[in-house]
Amino acid sequence: MNQRDRTAAAAAAAARARAVSRRHFLRGAAGTCLALPALESLLPAAALAAGPSAAEAAAATTATGAPLRTAFVYFPNGAIQPNWWPEGVGNTFKFNATLEPLEPLRRYVRVLAGLDHALANAGQDGGGDHARANCVFLSGARPFKSATDVRLGVSIDQVLAREVGHLTRFPSLELTCDDTRKASACDSDYACAYQYNISWSSPTTPVPAEGNPRLAFERLFGAGAPGERAEQTRRRQEAQRSVLDFVMEDARAMQRRLGTTDREKLDQYLTGVREVEARIQRAEKFGAGADPAVETPDGVPSDQAEYVTIMFDLLVLAFQTDATRVASFCLAHDGDNRSFSHIGIPEGHHDLSHHQGDPDRIEKVAKIDRWYAEQFARFLNKMESVKDADGRSLLHNSMIVYGSGNSDGNRHTHENLPVVLAGGGGGTLGPSRYVDYQSVPACNLFLSLADRMGVTRLERFGDSTGRLAL
């Protein structure tokens, strides 16, 4: 190679290096661009030298063949204990003030006492009971205290979704009437991800809940007016399908120029996008989804009661149309301090929960507790009014857990949690009753629900010690 050739080769190599250092996306021949994660190999040399800156199982069905559904509904800041727990025991119990709205459907209601989440207690971690209450509730795992290094466990709803999710358009549904946060620190230096998410698909991955009714509805049923949604969904899927096919050749060329660490990172990233594509293909397999004869919600209502009602109604529609069989609904994160002016309480819920024995504050918190129970009762009534495929009610063929990861909001305790199990479980749940399990892990309840959902290989979950007799 002569000097001219060597010079030209060096210039070409430099040009390629500059191109790679500037490349932050994969570009396909059709003009499609796919944004990339940050890759060390794409950073200028000066930046690198500077170092870093700051198993398929059959779906559970009822005896008559209708699908079995499970939902977990979370309310914040515990409950005023004397108003929560019923009087009497067994099936002759009498609802107390907070749960009295459930009386019309008592045949489907079990009040479960003595369920604990010991891993939500302070231990050596100190403060942060609200963050722990929220994230431990469905995971039964101890969160690692950090604002950036998030480590928890898989929540029970996602365990169920892995088992039966392939049989519906959506493996699971996550709803909230709250903000969703995944970054920075919140309660006592716990990551916000802990305090604002009750559903986790892996120890490091919360499943963000949808808090906008319009977006939740359009995800489930498509955009547009009734009668137009199937076509709108088909067009959206067509536009999204196989976007990587346009850029994979460019990706393979790039991988040859990346270092080992960045190749692994790029592979992981592309795998994640492929998983999205797989979800689209799975949705297509089921054909056009149901198109409820209701108008699409406008968005987030300013009225809290209307907001909660709409989200509960969406959950009913999701179960009714078999869009999913597993759901979680966080009414508000633990530590939530919104006011309840619509029921005459202008003070913040969390502030009031630290009542220190003040009768007026206790009465106001009890009123908030009952308001949440009234919204839950309305949801159960709607579930009972909807007929399922087998002629029984949707509520008969469901298991609904309603509870909080905090027991006494004044003292931040996590023993004897306020928990209700509603629904008929397709005939697999025992009669209505009030039972005290005398201090056992709440995860024992989750094992018993998993059995009914057909999760046959789950010997333990979280800190479980056995199964509950339900």
Image (cartoon, rainbow, N blue to C red):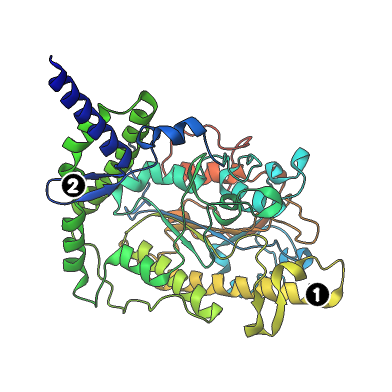
Residue displayed at 31% across by 78% down: 294
Q: Position of residue 82 (x, y in %)?
A: 79, 66
Q: Nearer the viewer, mark 1 or mark 2?
A: 2
Q: Position of residue 47 (x, y in %)?
A: 45, 36
- Could you give the CA–CA distance between mark 1 and mark 2, rounded to whole angstroms? 57 Å
Amino acid type, residue under disc 1 in the picture: Arg
Q: Secondary structure at mark 2?
A: loop
User: In this orientation, which residue lies closer to the viewer: 117 or 339?
Assistant: 339
Side of 237 where 409 appears, left or right: right
Side of 361 where 159 appears, left or right: left
Amino acid type, residue under disc 2 in the picture: Ser
Crowding around mark 2 (Cα neighbors within 10 Å: few <14, some 14 to 19, many 20+) is some
Instruction: Specify the label residue 242 is tagged with.
Output: 2
The image quadrant that residue 261 belongs to is top left
Instruction: Specify the label residue 361 is tagged with.
Output: 1
User: In this orientation, which residue lies closer to the viewer: 114 or 350?
Assistant: 350
